[in-house]
Image (cartoon, helix red, strand yellow):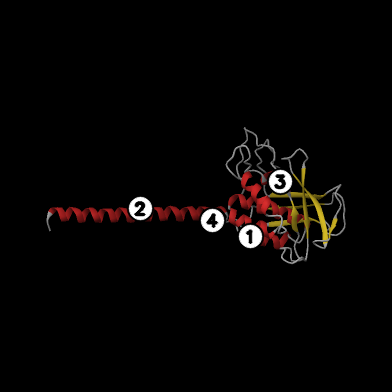
């Protein structure tokens, strides 16, 4: 073997070795990243509901709450939450906030959860608005939008709520239940408490229907409308950054 051929072969072997090491390094980094993400959600998802808001009798200011340790990370976990709290009116309100926050983190997963918790005509417009809220435009972006509906979160503290997370809901004092011929059931007007709005609360209309092609299935409450959840909350304080949600 002459010198030139030896050098060419040596270079080829060196390139192959370096490429192999690079692939192994990238694979290791990817695996570590996956492990870190899984570790962040290693704590089992837990959710509970309290209070008894009637789905048939209008009782002004009747209240309830939902408590959870972290937001669902998957559609499966969202369905687990739905099975536990979705049969209560205020459970649907909490699930809406969960689904919107999930959309911020993963649009495909979040959109699927939104579809599960809303009448079919109440998905397109909210999703369009959420893309603005969770986008990069400094004039519109509100990554802390859903945090504003958690107990203890305020503009002054960066919308960093206390844990476990808690969502507080009450029946509207002024809007009575309204029977819908379209859905053949009552529409309930509930208010979720928030310190991110000057009103102190935002209205979410929910219902439980047997209407075909709706995700309620006559078993779960779902959301008819919730524009207050995706209308901008007050901007966060410059001196207290939002730290994110678990």
In three-dimensional space, the C-alpha distance between marks 3 and 2, rounded to whole angstroms, equals 46 Å
Comparing 157 with 20, the one in front is 20
Q: Is residue 67 above or below residue 233?
A: below
Residue in the picture at 34% in, 54% down: 21
Q: Nearer the viewer, mark 1 or mark 4?
A: 1
For the point 67% across and 56% down, the residue is: 114
- Give the labeled residue for mark 3: 149
Looking at marks 3 and 2 on the same chain, the residue that comes earlier in the sequence is marked by 2
Q: Is residue 231 left or right of residue 137?
A: right
Q: Earlier in the sequence, mark 3 or mark 4?
A: 4
In the picture, which quadrant includes the N terminus? bottom left
Q: Quadrant of residue 6?
A: bottom left
- The residue indicated by pointer 2 is 22
Mark 3 → mark 4, Cα distance in angstroms: 26 Å
Query: Which residue is identified by label 1?
Result: 77
Distance in Å between CA atoms under marks 1 and 2: 36 Å
Residue denoted by label 4: 38
For numbered disc 1, what is the local secondary structure?
Answer: helix
Measure the alpha-carbon separation of dots 1 and 4: 14 Å
- For residue 54, which quarter of the picture? bottom right
């Amino acid at each position: 073997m002459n010198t030139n051929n030896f050098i060419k072969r040596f270079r080829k072997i060196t390139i192959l070795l370096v490429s192999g090491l690079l692939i192994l390094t990238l694979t290791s980094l990817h695996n570590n990243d996956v492990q870190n993400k899984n570790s962040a959600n290693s704590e089992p998802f837990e959710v509970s509901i309290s209070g008894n808001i009637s789905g048939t009798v209008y009782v002004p200011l009747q209240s309830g709450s939902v408590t959870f340790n972290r937001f669902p990370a998957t559609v499966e976990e969202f369905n687990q939450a739905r099975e536990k709290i979705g049969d209560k009116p205020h459970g649907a309100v909490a699930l809406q906030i969960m689904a919107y926050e999930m959309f911020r983190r993963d649009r495909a997963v979040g959109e699927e959860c939104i579809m599960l918790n809303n009448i079919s005509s109440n998905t397109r417009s909210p999703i369009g608005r959420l893309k603005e809220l969770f986008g990069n435009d400094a004039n519109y972006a509100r990554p802390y939008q859903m945090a504003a509906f958690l107990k203890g979160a305020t503009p002054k503290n960066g919308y960093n709520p206390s844990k476990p997370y808690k969502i507080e809901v009450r029946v509207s004092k002024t809007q009575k239940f309204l029977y819908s011929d379209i859905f053949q059931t009552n529409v309930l007007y509930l208010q979720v408490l928030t310190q991110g709005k000057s009103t102190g609360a935002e209205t979410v209309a929910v219902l439980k229907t047997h209407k075909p092609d709706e995700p309620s299935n006559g078993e779960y409450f779902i959301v008819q409308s919730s524009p207050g959840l995706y209308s901008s909350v007050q901007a966060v304080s410059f001196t207290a950054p939002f730290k994110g949600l678990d």
